Image: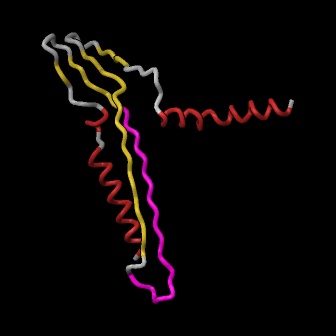
Amino acid sequence: MAESKMSDMIRASLDGIKDFTDVDTVFGKAITTPGGVTVIPVSKISVGFATGGLDFQSKRPISPTNFGGGSGTGVSIAPVAFLTVGRNGEINLIQISSSEKGTFDKAFDLIENSPAILEKIKNTFSS
């Protein structure tokens, strides 16, 4: 019984992500300027998902209501670039640069670089 409830929670969260994010979220609606240039916004999507649950053990006989669980989903959408298509078919990518990294990007960089950081620390103390 609990497995079914857990599956339902996971399915509901994933269905919500599918409904919210699709190719139109990454590549936005094309805008054509009066000069004939088409501009297409491009976004970065980050998704976080967590779920958990448990069956309660109690002195009373097991009941179908002895289940606790929850799930959560977070979605972040950030513009990163624009594709431009000129009247002659020339395609350009205009990137949006951000000098300030967000907390998530900093944490990701730290995790990604942790082997090199640990190696430097190890070499410093072993010398």
Q: Give above or below for 74 relative to 109.
A: below
- Image coordinates for residue 57, horizontal then vertical, percent: 51, 80
Which residue is at 42% across, 51% downward? 49
- Image coordinates for residue 43, horizontal then vertical, percent: 33, 31
Query: In the image, is 115 to the left or to the right of 32?
Result: right
Could you say which quadrant of the image residue 51 lies in?
A: bottom left
The part of the chain drawn in magenta is 44-64
Q: Give above or below for 47 relative to 116.
A: below
Protein image colouring: secondary structure
Could you say which quadrant of the image residue 12 lies in?
A: bottom left
Query: In the image, is 32 to the left or to the right of 125?
Result: left
Query: In the image, is 22 to the left or to the right of 7?
Result: left
Which residue is at 46% across, 62% downward? 52
- Image coordinates for residue 4, horizontal then vertical, percent: 38, 71
Q: Give above or below for 31 relative to 53.
A: above
**Looking at the figure, which quarter contains the C terminus?**
top right
